[in-house]
Structures are given as structure tokens and as C-alpha cells.
Image: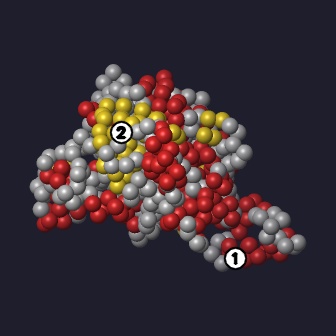
Amino acid sequence: MSDKIKGMRKGLANYGDAGFSLFLRKAFIKAMGYSDKALDRPIIGITNTYSGYNACHRNVPELIEAIKRGVLMAGGLPIDFPIISMHEAFSHPTSMFTRNLMSMDAEEMIRAQPMDAVVLIGGCDKTVPALLMGAASADVPAILTVTGPMITGSHKGERLGACTDCRRLWGQHRAGTIDEQEIEEISGKLAPGPGTCMVMGTASTMALVSEAMGMMLPGGAAIPAVHADRLRHAEATGERAVEIAREGLKPTSVMTEASLRNALRVLQAVGGSTNGVVHLAAIAGRLGLDIDMQEFDRMGTETPVLVDLKPSGQGYMEDLHKAGGLQVVLKNIAHLLEKDALTITGRTLGEEIEAAPPSWPQNVVRPLSDPIHSGGGIRVLRGNLAPNGAIIKQAAATPELLKHRGRAVVFTSLQDMAERLDLPDLDVRADDVLVLQNAGPKGAPGMPEAGYLPIPKKLAAQGVKDMVRISDARMSGTAFGSIVLHISPEAADGGPLALVRDGDMIELNVEAGSIRLDVPEDELQRRAKEWNMPEFVDIERGYRRLYFQQVLQAEHGCDFDFLRKYPLNNKTL
Ligand code: FES
Ligand code: MG
């Protein structure tokens, strides 16, 4: 009998009779058909994140089979268990709203059930951060694998991928160049199989930064979902899970200050999703750490974007896999990484980089001398409009708009934007700044990916493709444009964003790292006195109530206050 079953819940489930408690556990585990011999080995839990709603996790059943094979080969007993699954398109009001719920599910079920180690199967955007947050808090030996990116689709000879091309083609539909029938046809071609969005969206970003952080076996992030390598990686993950159970290698030994800094560095180098910043801040908070946004900004200035994937570049994840995956990126920025960081292999990141196969000629991962974008992917902004910070994905912005002064056109909510954005008489010009309020962590709620405000129809029809857009929302990692996000504090929490009015002048200067509202201080104070907390924040019951009471701002990863590790040791990354 596994020690874990024998010793489970000492003092909790025994109710004073340890012998009876063990007898009971044996009886129920044997009801699953196991023999004593099968139970006499390390138990490896496997989070089953399959769901009929989650196409990004369609291949989870075959991954579980491969992981189980690896566990059995290494002498462990695999037991999969269900856990919340979330797909970006089917999570109302947003997947960010339920990410913390998934992290709580992961933490408590890892803790509640007897297991010596756990394999985490992530994939779609919020699942990887939720699992890592939960695993960091439970701190049982854990190893991550992912479902992997989708392969690309094609339409009229043009290669397509979710969901950078979704936005581009929908933009053409809005502008009238793609008709109803064709856009319908395209919807069947954008996501042609199991796996995660195959551009450098949040799922790809989180897979890559998790590998860089050392929580996944090398090479795992970029393998397409349908590739046989994906199953071999899962099998190897199962094998390694048994070893980390025996070694007692815990997540808090792998997810450390150094490995999180490496993850932030890689986030810049791959041109990763802005959501990566929020999720890494949440993971850091579970370890009692805060991310120093100025340091992250500084990393960006010395870490160019090297990976030529949409939306900053041209390719898709399958191209990155063929080019050698993350290991090529790590080699190219090795001098910037903290190589002593321990990985789940038991070796350091530096040792893994040295052991990586030699690179071959390819044009997906660029050398430092020829980057996609010379500054990092993401720039941190501050100013009177964002006292606690905001970010912009400069690599995916229009260079001419990175320094811009324009008139504010304000939408007070998502609803307001939906109702007025396309009105023919909306007073808006191409050089205006579109402002969306009340779309932050509390405001919408769940900080939806609404920061990519559509270009007003009348301007889109004139051929306007980009404008400066600012909000307290997030943006899909697959989107592009001159878009300022995560303004903190958010409008619904009384941040200065709530005080912007139509016609105010806003100044964006990405090079200087600033975002300013050009309104006199006394006028801002007058408006602040008039401001009231939106009524919808006052929810009576349930998870929503917990959410509103506990959710933190973007710089703290939108985690719940009570889930962070306190007291924070005042350490910043
Ligand atoms: Fe799941 Fe994009 S919808 S990764
Ligand atoms: Mg996404």
C-alpha cells in the first residue's frame, strides 16, 4: 500500500481510530479494482482537464493514456481525477473570472486526495496559470505538460490561425470586403483541430514561460497537439513524475525568484501575450513575491523579440516547433538568464541549455543581431492616468502611434461601447484616443479581453486600421494594435481612468514609458469628488461576491487576496 494512502490525513480523517481509517481507505480504493501489489508504489495524480466545451483540451484523454504509460513504466500508479476546465470562448463573463476558482480546485484536490506527485495538464489560456497557482500553494511534487498548439488552417491558399487571423478577417468583414457567406466559411477553417491557439497568444506564451520556469520537461511547449512527439512528451512527463515523487522535488523548489525572472525575460523574448504579466504576477503572489514592473520594463530594453510568430511577426507555433522550440530561444538569450535556476528535470536551466540539441539553420527564432523588434515585446507605462502602471505590447503596435497626443472619446462601459461605437454620428477621428472605462478586474467583471476596442465602423470603412486605445481591460495575446492595457487602479475601483471625459487630451509616449491625462489637477480632484462606485460591484452572494470582495488589481495578478502567500516577504522579482 502506498505510504500516501496509509498516512493520508493523519489526525484529520482518523477520528481517533487510525486502523479503521486505513481499513476504510483500502476498501474504497480496492473498489476501483486495484490489487495490493498495484497499490504498493508511488501514486501519481493526473489532473483531467478534459471538457466537452474545451476544444483546446480535446486531446486530453490520449495525453492521460500516454502519461499513465510513463508512470507505469517508472513503477508508479497513475490515478487521474477531474478538475475544472475552461475554454476562452465558453467562460461567462470571462475565463479570468473563473481562473482563481480553478486554482482553488487544483490546490484543494491535490491536497485532499492521496498522491505523491501530480501531473498537471494545462492548455487553454487560463488553465496553465490556474494549475501552477494551485500547485504552488499545495506544494506537492508537480510537473506540467500542455495539450499543445493547434496546426494551422487554410483559406483560399492563405494560411490561417486562431485567433490573430480571426481578428484581421473579421476586421475586413466589418469594413465590407468579406461578405456574410465567406466569413461563415472562414469560421470553419480558423481552428482546424485539437489544441490551443497556434499564434503567440496567451496559451502559447504560458506554455513557453512555464517551460522556461522549469515546470515542464524541455521542448514541451511548442509540440503541436496532434504530433506524435506530444504523446512521447506526455509519456516522459509521467515517468519523471514518479521520480519527482521519490525525490520529493516540490514546486516551490522550481518556481523561485530566479525562475520567475527567467520567465519574465522569456516573455519579452518571445513577444508573449500581455496576459503573461498578469498570470506570472499571480503565480509570484502564491510564492510570497511581487513582480517589480520597472525591472520587467528594464528587461524589455535589453531583451529583443526574437520569435517571428503572429501577432508580432509572421509564423505559427508549429513553425517554432520545427525550428527547435524554446530551447533555441533560451540558447540565444542564455547570457541574460539566471542559469542556476533548478528545473523539474533535477538539473539547472544552464545544464539543460548545454544539453539541448545543436541548432540548425531556420528563420523563426532570430539571432540577437537580427531581432523582430529591438525593444522587448511589452513596455510598462506610468503617469497620472495609471499611477500603479499600465502596459502596451509595443511589438504589435503601429510605430507612428507610439508617441501620440489625441482627444479622448470615452465609453463608460462595454455596454456603452457596444451601443455607440458604430453610430454614424459618433464624433470620432482617426487621431483620437478611444477610452474604455469599467472593464477591469471588478468593472466588467473579470477583466475581459476587451482592450482591443474595434475601430469605429465609419473609420474602418475609410481604411483606418489602428488607433490609440486605452482601458483597464486585458487584450487577447493574439491581438495587435496600439493598445494600452491593465490601467491600474481600474476605473471601477476609483482609478483616474474613471475621471476621463470626452475631449480631454491624452498623451502616450511609449519611449518615455508614460501615459498622461492633460487635465489640471484641481479639475481632476473636482471630478473625483463626484465619482461613485458602480452599483454592479455590490453583489449579494456566491462566488461573485467572493470575487468582488477579494480580487486584486492587475499588478497583483488579479488573484484573490486570501490566496496570496502572506506575510509577503517583501521580496520583488
Ligand atoms: Fe484555448 Fe485560444 S481558445 S488557447
Ligand atoms: Mg486568448
- The three-letter code of the residue at mark 2 reads Ile
- The three-letter code of the residue at mark 1 reads Phe
Residue 291 vs 135, above or below: the answer is above
Q: Residue at x 31, y 52 (%)?
A: 453
Assign the N terminus to one quadrant of the image: bottom right
The residue at which mark 2 appears reads as: 506
Element at label 2: strand
What numbered label is drawn on residue 28? Answer: 1
The reply to whether discs 1 and 2 touch (Cβ–Cβ < 8 Å) is no
Q: In this rendering, which labeled residue sits more in front, label 1 or label 2?
A: 2
Mark 1 Cα shell of 10 Å, populated few (<14), some (14-19), many (≥20): few
Q: Nearer the viewer, residue 319 or 335?
A: 335
Q: Nearer the viewer, residue 196 or 257?
A: 257
Q: Position of residue 487 (x, y in %)?
A: 45, 45
Q: Position of residue 346 (x, y in %)?
A: 61, 39
Q: Nearer the viewer, residue 525 or 25?
A: 525
The reply to whether residue 65 is in sight is no
Q: Residue at x 70, y 39 (%)?
A: 569
Q: Position of residue 501 (x, y in %)?
A: 37, 49
What numbered label is drawn on residue 565? Answer: none
Q: Residue at x 37, y 60 (%)?
A: 414
Q: Position of residue 454 (x, y in %)?
A: 27, 53
In primary-sequence order, the first of circles 1 and 2 is 1
In this picture the colour scheme is: secondary structure
Q: Quadrant of residue 116?
A: bottom right
The reply to whether residue 253 is in sight is yes
